[in-house]
Image (cartoon, helix red, strand yellow):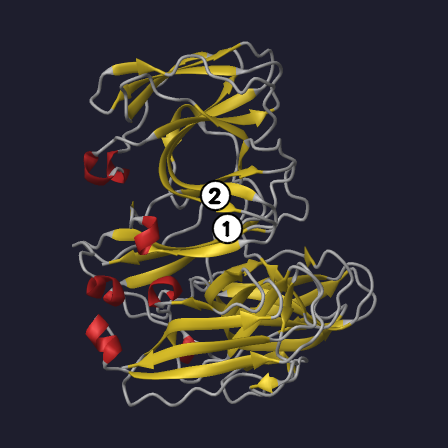
Amino acid sequence: MAITTLDNWIAAYKQIIPMTRLAATPRTTVASGWFTTMDQAGQPGAGTLAGVGANGAVQDDTTAGYPQITTFAGGATGYLSRLEYSSTVACRIQLFDCLWKGGPYAFNANQAITMPSISARVPGADYRGLEIWAEQVTTATLNQTWNVSYNDEGGAGGTTGATGIGAAPTVGRCWQLPLAAGDSGVTAITNAQGGTGSAGTTNILLLRPLAQVRINTANYGDVLDMLRLGFPQIYDTSALMCLVAADSTSLGNPDITVEIASG
Amino acid sequence: MTITTLEGIKSSQRWRIPLRRAAGTTIASVFNSTITRGGDPAAGTLAGASTAAGILQVDSTGGYPTIPSFLGGAKGYLTGVDFISGTQLRFTLFDCLVKFGAYTFNANTAVTMPSITSRIPLNPAGSPDYTGLELWAEGVTTGTLNQSVTVTYNDEGGVSGSTGAVSAGTTIAANRRWQLPLAAGDTGVSAVTNVQGTVASAGTFNVLLMRPLFQARYVLQDVIQKWSLLEVGMPEIFDTSALDLSIFCDSTSSQQQDAYLEICSG
């Protein structure tokens, strides 16, 4: 089944998923740099930053740090249909479905990767739009870079090239590794190679972007309905995670509620 | 019955329920209860009336707006919100299910809670859906030190869990609220079984079990903002629901809030 009409949405089972961070002292960040929230206290509880090994693991809603999603009725399809958001600091927030996490890889790793299948979490087997990110697990030195090899949306090999942030990443820092020119997606990650740094460990993430919003000033917020969100498909195993780029040096406490309609 | 179409909404019974709060001082940048502030409905009582069991909150309890009875078999939904305020703020609208308290700062009280199943929407399998219910603490009288509260509960599947000690971050004051996040892996609450206060040496507090319905940011004072059914999401409401307005003001405020809640039933 699928939700194809407004009446379908009205009749759908809608579950409200909290993604509220309540850290007494939110993580210290670098202004305008992306940082993860998945290991911060709140509802759901904090998860573990470090990945589970070189080949990584598919992330799902039962993995600590991601909100749990009630199983959809048999044959139903789920959608992100509403987003309530605010934060205690001015920032940008991106919402992703975290498909896979590999690592933590040492600063100088050159690690071949055999990634588990993510096909159950890619709508219509359309791998376009998937993004590769680095996520710092322990503090780095120097301008830590990562060069990730992957198979693109059609299965052809590609590489991100060595990409850093121009400084030593601190714990929780995330940065995107752009795909090679002409590539628009990722079916598999095959190798991760660190460069420049002399300490620290890093995860590599494969993410499906769902929404991005802006908090103009501290405590600002808004509600986006399905028309403004584009009604992206969600699975009842999706690992929903937020990255935050704060205007200043505190991650703040984002307060996000996700509505998932399934029918 | 259930409303499943836009035509069903058009032909349903609909009411605009006022939720107006008179001016009253709030604490900036934290959530505050508004139940003791007069208006429409009239002010209610902050202190809970039972520490050992808690009291099921209903629309006829003082401080909550009255909801017309639905026709037999009809279901109700929140389909729209109008809001105006004299100050910029965030707000959350809850269905307040049970209020426990008021507890002394060092209470350690076993709780046998009244049934809440009549106020819990059903999941697709036809069972009460306890996921999404939240636990909050609420200051009743001024305390000392950094009041911490631990609530032991049964989760959405009936398995025991604990919030751990969650501090208010400062001394508590009347109406100040802070959320008690559930243990990792828990997504809801089917019962509260114990409440414990620590650290503080004075003051009293309530614990609230609430179902969040809608939250939003009110961006510009004295402007009316409206949210339609697409933005509100049509959460299910009962004709006994205790609709609770919790506000998070940008600054200390003495301004009023004035809301209309559109409820449809069919």
Judging by the rendered image, the residue that carries numbered circle 1 is A44
Amino acid type, mark 2:
Ala
The reply to whether discs 1 and 2 touch (Cβ–Cβ < 8 Å) is yes
Tell me what residue is drawn at x 43 percent, y 72 percent: B81
Q: Nearer the viewer, residue B230 or A75?
A: B230
| Closest to the observer, B36 or B171 | B36
Left or right: where B161 falls relative to A125: right
Tell me which residue sits at (37%, 33%) in the image. A207
Q: Which image quarter: residue B158? A: bottom left
Q: Where's the C terminus of chain B, which quadrant?
A: bottom left
Give the residue drawn at x 51%, y 41%: A92
Question: Is residue B2 visible from the viewing direction of this image?
Answer: no
Q: Is residue A50 above or below residue B99?
A: above
| Residue B224 spot, x, y in % from top left | 49, 69
Secondary structure, mark 2, is loop
Residue B68 relative to residue B140: left or right: left
